[in-house]
Amino acid sequence: MKKTLLIVLAGSLLFSCQKNQGSPDPVATEGPSGQLVVNIGAPETKSDNTALKDYQINSYQVFVFDATGKKETDRYASLSTSPSQNNVSVTITTRTGPKTVYAIVNSPRLAFGTLASLESHLSDLNENTHTNLVMSGKNGITVTEYDKNKNGEVAPQTLDIDIKRLASMIQLDAVTVDFRNTSLEGGSFTIQEIYLKNVVGRAPLGVSGSPGTGMPLLLGDTDHTNYDYWYNKLTKQVTGAPSVTYDSFTKTCTVAGVATSVAHDLFAYPNKTDGDSTDNTFSQRKTRLVIKAHVTASTYSSPAVDQDTYYTFDLPVLVANSVYKIGNINITMLGKDDDTDDTKSLAGRVTPTITVDPWTGTTQLNYEM
């Protein structure tokens, strides 16, 4: 979905009566000052997952940098006790002149002295939840003086900022299990957990490109190959994995070739790895989706089956603020007996298409094995 910040800037000296009408941040007294009224809008994304609130605003911080890249002022607010699902507003005072304005949503409170330090700061995937996705956006404007004493006709300036999510969404819609005419016919298939492994866990807050089309900056090669920045390497780690990378639940699927709705979403920071590896010594590689299920079968299976099984699927290059929608996974056999390494027992057939979505885009994925 597209998040928009509407920023109204007015260059004027604040009289004492004006200060009593709000709580704008203090600003140096040299030269004329401006006032920024920020309206943050967050429309909801359509999703079958009712637990997903990727539009929700729990906190926001607006930074204003001058032409030299020095921070001029900022304003932070936490809405954790009463999150916003529509619009929130914040007022900031600033000087006139060229400005770069950043809006950071749902991140821990930050302190930056320069534009460069903000743009190079790495967010940790652990800062994200299904109801608290970290977002970033910027725009630039030259603030002109707004002084009704000098010009009674002067009007405030406006500035729009498009907010992008730093994460990629992996959305599993349905699983079709078809054990008919196999040794597993008449058995049962119950999903116990889905998770992502080989997950990049850091992403820059900075945004590149033009307003409206800018995207979060890519993680540099040095940081991308710093494997301390990755989660669930080779397999799901015992502790410390970001909550958005796994989801434990019980879902019993029909085993007669009829799709079962799953409607669960996982998140990872962008992974630009195009090549792949299954070596036991970890190196950069594709992010994978894993389904853990429990399968039973006794009528035609000898010996009887009563075991956990794992299905592993490669994901394409992951891009920020993009949805990778797995419309369906067809399963006709057992997967791996465990997921203690990164070997692959399944070869997923992937057919990607790009469709319109409130996020940057949706890549449609379907797997069969």
Image (tube, grey):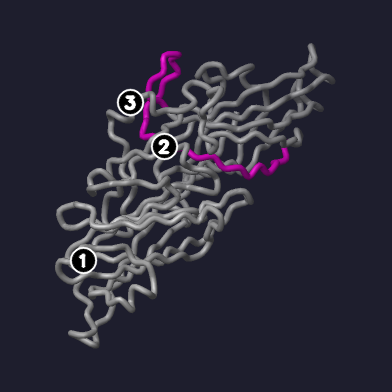
For this rendering, which residue is in front, 340 or 186?
A: 340
Instruction: Compare marks 1 and 3 and give the one earlier in the sequence.
Output: 1
**Residue position marked by numbered label 3 in the rendering:** 225
Neighbour class for label 2 at 10 Å: few (<14), some, many (≥20)?
some
Placement of the C terminus among the 4 image quadrants: top right
Neighbour class for label 1 at 10 Å: few (<14), some, many (≥20)?
many
For this rendering, which residue is in front, 258 or 246?
A: 246
On the question of residue 356 being in view, the answer is: no
Determine the residue positioned at 41% across, 50% down. Answer: 135
Neighbour class for label 3 at 10 Å: few (<14), some, many (≥20)?
some
Q: Quadrant of residue 3?
A: bottom left
Left or right? Give the position of 294 relative to 213: right
Dominant SS of magenta comes to: loop
User: Where residue 124 is drawn, which disc sits there?
Assistant: 2
The location of residue 191, given as percent across then percent down, is: 69, 32
User: Where residue 95 is drawn, which disc sits there?
Assistant: 1
- Amino acid at circle 1: Arg
